[in-house]
Amino acid sequence: MRILLVEDDQSLGDGMCIALHREGFVVDWLTDGVQALQAIEQESFDLVILDLGLPRMDGMSVLNKVRDKAIDIPILVLTARDAIEDRVSGLDAGADDYVVKPFDIVEIKARIRAIVRRSKGRAVTTISHGEIEVHPDSMRAVYQGQDVSLTRREFVLLQELISRPGHVFTRDAIVQSLYGWGEEVESNALEVHIHHLRKKFYSGLIRTIRGVGYVIEKP
């Protein structure tokens, strides 16, 4: 899952990037509203964590412009403004959730998981596909009743593919979900991840659509 973090506090941004990265999220971090709006318009993210007190363009303006353009990306607002009217304004403007600073990163991670489940139309926390179970909350994968050891990127890739069986993911879309800005991507990195997943589960799990991408077929 790829997250755009928009936060101008350096220490808070650093801490959130580290914590979310440990949970398997790919995190791109920006510090002002103008850059954030451009990134949301031009790139693909699964969720935006948006601070309201930003330079150049405040977070509420970013939120309003994103919704005015009918971009339905989930947005979690972070702010030091704790008045009820501020929360109501944020939610009415189109935020999916609203968290007041200071907060515990554990709460943020739980809210992220809940927002993503809602956005993908899933009420349950486990994704099942035949004899495979994927547990996003704990980053566990189970096959035929046994835990399967996966790297962070292998888990993210499996979760992306298995959450939408029958959907063909392009190579570019998958790479964007696995790697953030500034991360070097070797030319055969995706193929290596696919090979490892086939080996750890079964060879027919992921089908290659030549010249397009990859798909996990519906059970």
Image (cartoon, grey):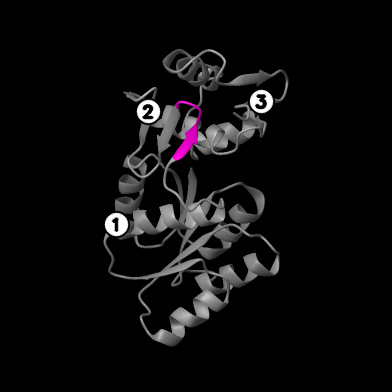
Q: Is residue 169 or residue 205 the one in the foreground? A: 205
Q: Which residue is mark 3?
A: 213
Q: Is residue 58 visible?
A: no
Q: Image check: 47 left or right of 14?
A: right
The three-letter amino acid code for the residue at tag 3 is Gly
Instruction: Label 1: state its secondary structure.
Output: helix
Magenta stretch, residue numbers: 127-131
| Sequence-earlier tag: 2 or 1 | 1
The three-letter amino acid code for the residue at tag 1 is Ile
Q: Quadrant of residue 40?
A: bottom right
Q: Which residue is mark 2?
A: 142
Compared with 137, 206 (above or below) is: above
Query: Neighbour class for label 1 at 10 Å: few (<14), some, many (≥20)?
Result: few
Q: Is residue 129 located in the magenta-colored stretch of the structure?
A: yes
The percent position of residue 138, horizontal first and vertical second, equals 32, 41
Q: Which residue is mark 1?
A: 105
Instruction: Label 3: state its secondary structure.
Output: strand
